[in-house]
Image: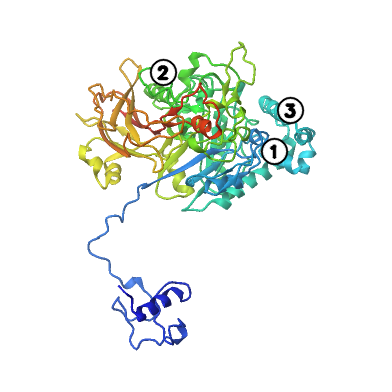
Amino acid sequence: MKKSKYLQTLIITSVTTVGIGLPVFAQNMGTGDPSVIKPAEKEYNTMGMPNKGTYDPSVIKPAEKEYSPYLNYNYPDKVFFGDTHLHTSYSTDAGMFGNRLGPEEAYRFAKGEIVTSSTGVRTRLLRPLDFLVVADHAENLGLSPMIAESTPELLKNEWGKKVHDLVKAGKLGDAYAAWGDAVTKRKDPLAEQGALVKTMWERVTASAEKHNQPGEFTAFIGYEWTSTPGGSNLHRNIIFRGGKDLADQIVPFSVYDSEDPEDLWTWLANFEQKTGGRVLAIAHNGNLSNGLMFDDVTFTKKKPLDRDYAQRRMRWEPLYEVTQMKGDGEAHPSLSPNDEFADFETFDKGSFGGAKDPGMIPREYAREAFKRGLQYEEKLGANPFKFGMLGSTDSHTSLATSTEDNFFGKISAVEPTAKPVRFEEMITGYLPDPKGRDYTIRHVSASASGLAAVWARENTREALWDSMKRKEVFATTGTRLRVRVFAGWDFEADEVDRWDFAKQGYSRGVPMGGDLKNAPAGKAPIMMIRALRDPDGANIDRIQVVKGWTSKDGKAHEKIFDAACSDDRKIGADGRCSKAVGNTVNVKEASYSNSIGEPMLFAHWKDPEFDAAQRAFYYVRVLEIPTPRWTTFDAKFFGVKLPEEVPASIQERAYTSPIWYTPKG
């Protein structure tokens, strides 16, 4: 239909008047000059009140009956994805291995900007992260930037000048060895230059404060405490709830102060008492701890765990980083022989300091820790391993890359390249094993993983931290797979399809990280589960419930149940879907098809073997269909040979925090 000349004038006027794009009825040939507009003789007021240029809400009478159903909704309604474990050049084991990017670049990259890596490769995330923790090592924090800047205070120290000169002479290996020797001996070579740590810490907190944008992007203040006794990994990431004003009142507690986690907990308690702030710690890589991460005795005194230990550990360490670059820590095939998905991205040869004995493995993996935690609770009345699960990268490149097609490696030296170093660089195996065993793990085995997913109301430090504290989180191996689970006693089968799914879940059950207690007579736990694929990723293969429990004889058990399977595959009487989903991966082209699997799966699952007298836990594992591994993408892009020691395809996955059941008494 042809527009009239009058209507055309109105349209032109509306889009050109003072840039606001609102209709303006102007005189004088449509010039849009508001000064020529004559006021109406009578004001039009939709409120039916005299319009005197003000709005007084006090005159509005509230309705007798509320119309909006959302007025009192205050439960978490969004999932936010981020990384709680990223290293920059401020970590010596990053800066001395070629990383030239600091916290500033790390935050810009996480926010979705294009950043040039330390090796000159431009990169960008497909989608920005919602939050980030720059968790640089506390031990001589910022040493590499100090060397780069030739900081005068550093050069006043004999050791500081030595490593400075080695780096400037290009002898990075010798400089790193000198630092590693100091850390191993737990003797701080810069102890007399304490102001240096304070200065670098305040740079870190200032960067976080600069990039923190409540409601849009959360920049947590944090760091890593790097306890590595004898080369065994006992590392913890420290996450502060508050801002720079509180964090600047301390300097990070480091391994120079102590390598005992219990001493770290005391320091965390002192921080809260001193500042009024809140803080928590997240352990990671029990698979590299050689049996120490979930040990049966305390670290220093070697005493059996007691109730006080259990309560303090869960007070300060409510979460565990279950998947990241240095392997997946959910389960191990030797511990879960009936779980065909347990052998996933497995690092099980040794720690950083020596090879592993098979007897160490039961004290290294999350599922086994959950099972033993039930036994401890039966004995002590407290569970030392009642943690939630999340994932993160542990990247030392300042680049939080977690997807297979955009993996920038563990350190800058192995960023994308056709050179053999990309696959062959050693991660473990540098130090001689006392028994002469080979425990070398190479970068070809590194995982492009993972992400922390947090259910919260808003994207702020406070809201996200509070959700972490109550364990309402889940881990993914790098994709943005969405999972939500509630457990209760009376959910009906059709309720998983309800529009108010979350409202019912919170009002009549508990979310991931929660507790069920005192089963009603004749009732069994019922789980309502929803899984939605990554919008840019692979379809879903299945939803599984992993159950652990203790029997009357005190033994701990586990069982895997398939709660929902894609493509109309049936679940048998044994609770399992025997038919595999298939594999569409084209290895040569590093591609796959979503012609199998489902974009979403829902499940209503009731424990068919529940015993109200037995302690139990339940967590959900969601598997995607097979997709190409990062090494397969590399083989196609660089035209290099596909490595034989790793699979060409993998099944990405998510793990939720458990829900625990505690019987009466």
Question: In the drawing, does residue 615 fall left or right of residue 205?
Answer: left
Residue 15: percent from left, percent from top: 43, 73
Front position in the image: 381 or 507: 507
Disc 2 target residue: 335
Disc 3 target residue: 174
> Alpha-carbon neighbours of circle 3 within 10 Å: few (<14), some, or many (≥20)?
few
Q: Quadrant of residue 260?
A: top right
Disc 1 target residue: 144
N-term-proximal mark, 3 vs 2: 3
Q: Tell me: residue 102, above or below residue 173.
A: below
Residue type, label 3:
Asp
Residue type, label 1:
Ser
Dot 2 lies on which element?
A: loop
Question: In the drawing, does residue 253 fall left or right of residue 368?
Answer: right
Question: Quadrant of the image for the N terminus?
Answer: bottom left
Q: CA distance from mark 3 to mark 1?
A: 14 Å
Question: What residue is at 35 percent from the left and 16 percent from the top?
Answer: 555
Q: CA distance from mark 2 to mark 1?
A: 41 Å
> Hey, which residue is sitting farthest left in the picture?
522
